[in-house]
Image: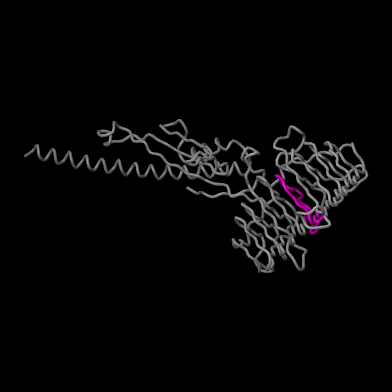
Amino acid sequence: MLLNYVLLLFTLVLLGGLAVDAGILEWRQQLLQQAADSAAQEAMYETAHTYSDWVSAGQAQATLNGFTNGVNGVTVSVGNNVSSDGFIDYRAVQTTITQNVNNIFMGLVNGGKSTITATAVARVIPTCFWILNPNSTFSNGGTFWLASTTFEASCGVFVNTATGNSLLVDGFASLDVVRTRVVGPSSGNASTGSVYTPPRFRSAAKNDPLAYLTAPTFSSCTHRNTNLSNAGVTLSPGTYCGGITLNNSQVILSPGLYIITGGLTMMNSTLNGMSGVTLYFTSGGGSGYGAITANGSAPIGTNYSSNLVLAAPTSSSGGGIPGIVIFGDRNWVAHGSYSVALTNTYIAGDGIWYIPNTGVSLWNCLYTDNNYSGMVLDCFYQFGGIGTFISTEYSTLGGYSPYHYDDGVLVQ
């Protein structure tokens, strides 16, 4: 009889111990998952904002939550998310935390340790079109204004305008982007066209996402008053003072940095810099900032349209700025003005247009890319034409967006 009581007591203690072990494992599993979630988001934040050592950032965040890589049986792994077919998603960060946990009673079954694992994936949601004008001065339009056209992007639009009109999509226009955020309220804005994702108004204001870029320096002129008519030539990097004017001409740009004062004017011409160029527009050498204008005497797709076909450098080896195809001097301030005005123009190629203090007007144009594009500008107006189509495949830049204020979400 005593033996039966001993066996019963042993069984009850063992079952109770197993329940305790199971509870401890469940508790540790929850802590592990919370740490993995937090580490993935911190690593994603670093990839999107500062480009520091995001692996170390993720591991440091795990440490703050009590799980240090290589300590107490813990392994913290941080890397890009890889799908089942081997595709690397450069915008997604995956964190996996594994720990060997000592058991009290389960050791009788499994040798004393259990291994628990938690995985989390955080993904950057890129914003590739930034309107920086804080105060709209338009009476009949917005700082981001679409009229009788299409705007599509695999990223987001951010409108920093807090007062007046900021967003206008007229009845014959469509806006199809991942998301649209507007600093100002919904009042004063009209979206009578097709807006596929409802805008989020009263968003927090943000600073210039490319403020970290170092602007090129103007020194002296290597070319003056470049005026080409009925020509087919190749230009080399340098400083072009007095502007560049093209009339019925076909011009190829060799790779590198072009510093231009006095602006750029094109008429029924093609400017081709697909080998990797940055065009920096500034003042100096006796010329002011000028404007960037292109015009075709007929809509795109004809022999009388203009073509602006440019691709940004993928490295700084040639003097250009990686990812930036057009750079406007930050002192070129023309709030509420369209100093970049393109009409009947085909615009293609990879690269970001960074002209933070002046605006862009596209009239009967097509703006597209091969891998990625986008703009940081003061205001934007697009009327007619085929439309704007923006991608966000940054593999040619090592997988990282040049913008420093992308946001992200925990997706797994």
Residue drawn at x 10%, y 39% as measured from the top left: 4
* Residue 115: image location, x then y, percent: 36, 36
Please name the residue shown 76% across and 33% down the image.
Answer: 318
Q: Is there any visible trace of residue 244 in the rendered image?
A: yes
Foreground residue among 68 and 309: 309
Q: Position of residue 282 (x, y in %)?
A: 84, 45
**Foreground: 34 or 125?**
125
Query: Taking 141 as reference, is 178 above or below it?
Result: above
Task: Measuring from the top left, give residue 363's x and y in whole percent.
Answer: 77, 59
The quarter of the picture where residue 385 lies is bottom right
| Residue 59 position (above or below residue 159) | above
* Residue at 63 percent of width and 41 percent of height: 50
Residue 237 in the magenta stretch? The answer is: no
The percent position of residue 348, horizontal first and vertical second, equals: 72, 48
Which residue does the image show at 30% across and 40% down from the upper left? Answer: 21
Identify the coloring.
one colour
Tell me the quarter of the picture where residue 319 sits.
top right
The span shown in magenta is: 335-360
Residue 355, magenta (yes or no): yes
Query: Quick check: 251 above or below 149?
Result: above
